[in-house]
Image (cartoon, rainbow, N blue to C red):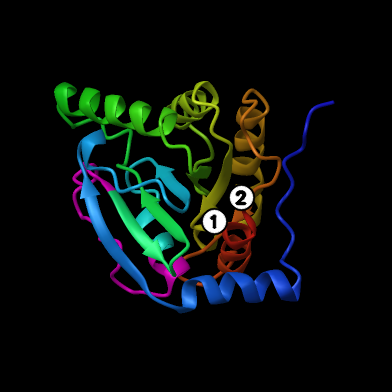
Amino acid sequence: MQMSFPEAAPPEPDAAEAGRLLFAGEVEFLKGVVAMSGLPPADRLEVCFAGRSNVGKSSLINALTGRKALARASNTPGRTQEINFFTAADSHYIVDLPGYGFANAPVAVVEKWQRLLKQYLSGRPTLRRAFVLIDARHGAKKVDEEIMTLLDRSAVPFQVVMTKIDKVKKSELEQSLGLTRAALAKHPAAYPELVLTSSEKGDGIETLRAIIAGLA
């Protein structure tokens, strides 16, 4: 039976409070990594965020952590070529992966990104979940399915987070959700719930915090 990938329900009060507390304390940038040798010790639970350029990844991480400029949003898509590590409390790494799908990036740069991503995803024992960000204005595209396939092959469970839901009409959102659900049905590593978010309005942020806090 095909999963329908429903929207994740709002968290119960205890789960919401756990999520709030996780991000209420110190959340700090630790380091940017350009090679596997630079990775910090795998000594805590880790989640990562992946998304194509301009999907709103930096804005979502800033909203999630309650910091306006923790993750740097660039006006030049594809400019961030590092894997950026942030610490949350003393228990979690929040990992910002390089944006993908920027057509104007040099081939050599794209190949370097892909190689580093593959090495990271397949070799990080504390990585509990990847969050794949999909723009609600467009739904899943071919380049998003490529990262999903990479996550399948790396045996990394991933969950789709729809961004910018405040930018679309309800009918347009339903269309993009349909495209995304159809894409997800092909991927065994996909977690069977979607999170719908707006960094500007705060929609879905409490849910996403609770999901991260609830991982073990």
- How many neighbours does mark 1 have within 10 angstroms: few (below 14), some (14-19), or many (20 or more)? some
Q: Relative to residue 194, is residue 167 drawn left or right?
A: left
Residue drawn where x is 44% and y is 47% of the image:
48
Residue 88 numbered mark, or none: none
Residue drawn where x is 18% and y is 22% of the image:
107
Q: Residue 158: x and y, percent?
A: 56, 39
Residue drawn where x is 55% and y is 58% of the image:
165
Q: Secondary structure at mark 2?
A: helix
Q: Which residue is mark 2?
A: 173
Is the residue 33 above or below the residue 207 in the image? above
Is the residue 101 above or below the residue 167 in the image? above
Q: Can the viewer see residue 153 in this picture? A: yes
Q: CA distance from mark 2 to mark 1?
A: 6 Å
Instruction: Assess whether mark 1 and mark 2 are in contact (beta carbons under 8 angstroms).
Output: yes
Q: Nearer the viewer, residue 175 or 199?
A: 199
Q: Relative to residue 13, is residue 136 drawn left or right?
A: left
Q: Secondary structure at mark 1?
A: loop
Residue 168 numbered mark, or none: 1
Q: Amino acid at mark 1?
A: Val
- How many neighbours does mark 2 have within 10 angstroms: few (below 14), some (14-19), or many (20 or more)? many
Range covered by the magenta-colored residues? 62-83
Q: Can the viewer see residue 73 in this picture? A: no
- Residue 70 colored in magenta in the image: yes
